[in-house]
Image: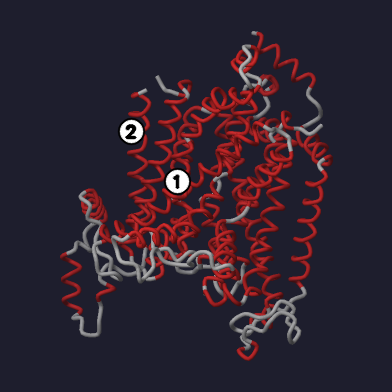
Amino acid sequence: MEQHNNEIVKFDNSPPTGIQVVLREFKKDKVAMLSFFGITLLIVVILVASMFLNQEEILKIKLLERFTEPGVNGYRLGADEAGRDMLGQLVIGAKNSILIAFAITIITSVAGIALGIIMGYYGGFIDNLFMRIIDFFITLPSLMIIIVFVTIIPKYGVLELILIISLFQWMSTARLVRSKALSEGKRDYVNASKTMGTSNLAIMFKGILPNLSSILIVEVTLNFAGNVGIETGLSFLGFGLPPSTPSLGTLVNYATNPLVLSTKWWVWLPASILILILMLGINYVGQALRRAADAKQRMG
Amino acid sequence: MWKTIVRRVLVMIPQLFVLSLLIFILAKLMPGDPFTGLITPETDPARLEELRIQAGFYDPWYVQYYHWITNAFQGDFGRSYTYKIAVSTLIGERGLNTFWLSLLSAIFVYLIAIPLGVLAGRYQDSLLDKSITLYSFISYAIPTFVLSLIFVFIFGYKLMWFPTSGTVDVGADPGTMAYYWSKIYHLLLPAITYAILGTTAIIQYLRSEIIDAKTQDYVKTARSKGVPMRKIYTRHIFRNSLLPIAAFLGFTITGLLGGSIFIETIFGFPGMGQLFIHSIMSRDYSVITSLVMLYGFLTLLGSLLSDIIMSIVDPRIRID
């Protein structure tokens, strides 16, 4: 009984809706704001710059310019084994990596959120069934299975890669949303809506979903960073993007050649550092959002 | 207690079954068959056909699945056609390398994470705590392959402190002290890299456990009895916070396995992860299916282990 009272008191005092509080808290965190604007600027610059680049010209093989050092002959970041300009490849690769990670994030978030809310709201059989499926997917050695999928699909391209990765990345969002929707579904406002005859669909997506917005923005941001890591990792191993479409991972992959790794740093190091900056920046923003969303950790 | 374990193991069985079915289907979808590797210009197509019939290539899929799974239970995973030896022998050899690497990495994980976690929790909000939090954030965000490459570049090629590939020096005689030292020496850099990446969860968990424990009644009691703060940390808080850390062992194993593909590729370390990549490149299907199955099994085992340790440590999560 006492617990019930507490809940009501908390409910009355609760500040405006979730996402507004998070953003208000987030603005107080200077470092997070800085990384947010830095990363946004970086992504915008990469996307805009890639539009002005002639991809065919950059990917043309010029053996005479093989391993040109940075700053020579107008190659600002040098050239690779085939004489291709590294700076241009870096921008195009970064664009591809970012857009693919973005697509995977959108697909897995939509799927995970929809499934999670349905599971949490209805409970019972649907919930049990999908929990079993999620448990199964989580224990799969997903990296290996993605690689196997990539090698057996006959017509393999960017879209296929996005779908294959998405197939193994929706579970954590679904599980998180499900657990939150489960506790949210027992709240008074949901019961009130039910009594008033609001449709289940409306309760789920207009009633419960907005209340989960604060944790979702955290989840989506961190997933985005994770997906950049997965795509570049796969491309690094040679099972990500096809060779015709450079990714940051394919550029780092040149370092598997010991000669390149030890003496031609300009071929692989810039791409590695760019991945590092992206990962650190996006993750930092994500963790700052998490702190902002968690009342216990707020900086005040 | 036993009920929990038995139930957990029972849940594992259908999971393993579905996993094996999935892998079997994937293997069937792969182009070619186990005899593709044997084809030479002199091969008689009729003889090949005969071999296929003999091996049950045209049997219905459930018969083939039955043969595959029963053979696997008896330790017969077929033959690798690039290495021309039994898959079980091949994986046994490579698995041992991966095992030593994982063991050393796990030791380093705990050696790094426990002191850092305890210090961060004890001196909460100090400069030390902030640096440790920053370290654990970076190690969490940095992708395995990027850190490994940078380490190979700096410590292997530039400073030349460590060898950059292999498991042992070519010149070392097996059985001598120099041989074992050379083995450990080859393991050190990959193991340290591995360990740095795996510390985040333990540091953060230990830190928040210790911060929570500070306000607990048993600490206040000890304090009011006049026990010095240092003793409270070593005798009371540390012991209480350390137990749940044991539960991370299972997850550490799982994490190490997942990372082994990157680490072994970059450090030129002939373990199971590198074997997997080579088998994929040479389309060595019997090795691929066995490895995916083995990794799936070990992942399940890791989470089982964590759940069991957790239920020993924390009686609240037992199923009765």
Residue at (32% x, 56% y) in the render: B290
Coordinates of residue A16 in the picture (x, y in percent)? 81, 29
Could you tell whether B79 is left or right of A141 in the image? left
- Could you say where residue B311 lies in the image, as x and y percent from the top left? 43, 26
Q: Position of residue B39 (x, y in %)?
A: 25, 78
Quadrant location of residue A247?
A: bottom right
Res A131 seen here = yes
Please identify the quadrant where the C terminus of chain A is shown. Answer: top right
Q: Which residue is mark 1?
A: B254
Between residues B155 and B276, which one lies in front from this camera angle? B155
| Callouts 2 and 1 on one subunit | yes
* Residue located 57% across and 76% down the image: A260
Q: How is the image coloured?
A: secondary structure
Amino acid type of the residue that numbered disc 2 sits on in the rendered structure: Leu
Label 2 belongs to which residue? B10
Tell me the amino acid under the disc marked 1. Thr
Residue at x 47% of width, y 50% of height? B105
- Position of the N terminus of chain A, as image quadrant, is top right
Q: Chain of mark 1?
A: B
Query: Element type at marker 1?
Result: helix
